[in-house]
Image (cartoon, rainbow, N blue to C red):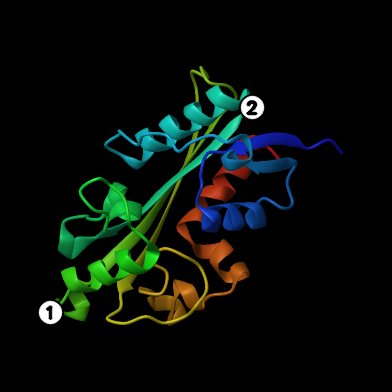
Amino acid sequence: MFKQKVVLASSNKGKLVELEYALADVNVTLIPQSEFSVPDADETGLSFIENAILKARHASALTGLPALADDSGLEVDALNGAPGIYSARFSADENGKGATDESNNKKLLIELAGVLPKDRTARYHCVLAFVKHQFDPNPIICQGAWEGIINTGFHGDGGFGYDPLFFVTDQNKTAAQLTKQEKKKISHRGLAIEQLKDLFKL
């Protein structure tokens, strides 16, 4: 069966792995934008939705292919919703460079020092945007959210981003301790992908 080629508008290897795994049973071949030497888009939006659409249109414009973008982040209540849309760049320098998963996690722990466990509530958000072409007037938008608590230390070596700190109460594990199968069923990205499958009618 012919599989539709779709460019993934991300350079985040963790996202690529999760999306490829989740979409393995559908009629789509995801190709990372790096294979086309597409640079990251300037994320100038003020919301996950705006940034996801920006990234999808950018990748589609430079490749001529349909594009799927993922804009995700962590919203921490005690930090008034930060790091939010800046989750990947939380610990960046004044030039927006230098942030890594490790440095972002360390900064988050510092920011939450002294905050009681009951006040460390947080949630992951994921927005997926799919465009058929650069000028698609009706992008497909799918969203998912995942509630948790920010731990005071690191647990688990799976996943990426803030997963080692993101404690999922009903699983009694951090996101980094969950299997791929478990994460696919309950995570913010997994929920958004299920919506995408339904809308695609795949």
The amino acid on which the numbered mark 1 sits, given as a three-letter code, is: Gly
User: Can residue 188 be seen at all in this image of the molecule?
Assistant: yes
- Left or right: 24 with respect to 106? right
Mark 2 Cα shell of 10 Å, populated few (<14), some (14-19), many (≥20): many
In percent of width and height, residue 40 lies at 45, 38
The amino acid on which the numbered mark 2 sits, given as a three-letter code, is: Leu
- Kindly report the distance in space between the C-alpha atoms of the residues bearing marks 1 and 2: 48 Å
**Element class at badge 2:** loop
| C-beta proximity under 8 Å, tags 1 and 2 | no
In percent of width and height, residue 77 lies at 20, 61
- Left or right: 60 with respect to 169? right
Q: Which residue is mark 1?
A: 114
User: Image height check: is 59 above or below 138?
Assistant: below
Q: Residue furthest left?
A: 114
Would you identify the image quadrant in which residue 123 lies? bottom left
User: Image height check: is 143 above or below 123?
Assistant: above
Count up the numbered dots.
2
> Of tags 1 and 2, which is closer to the observer?
2
Label placed on residue 140: none
Q: Residue at x 36, y 69 (%)?
A: 102
User: Image height check: is 180 above or below 14?
Assistant: below
Q: First in sequence: mark 1 or mark 2? A: 2
Q: Quadrant of the C terminus?
A: top right
Q: Quadrant of the N terminus?
A: top right
**Element class at badge 1:** loop
Q: Which residue is mark 2?
A: 65
In percent of width and height, residue 29 lies at 72, 42
Q: Residue at x 27, y 81 (%)?
A: 152
Q: Residue furthest right?
A: 1
Q: 172 or 160: nearer the eye?
A: 160
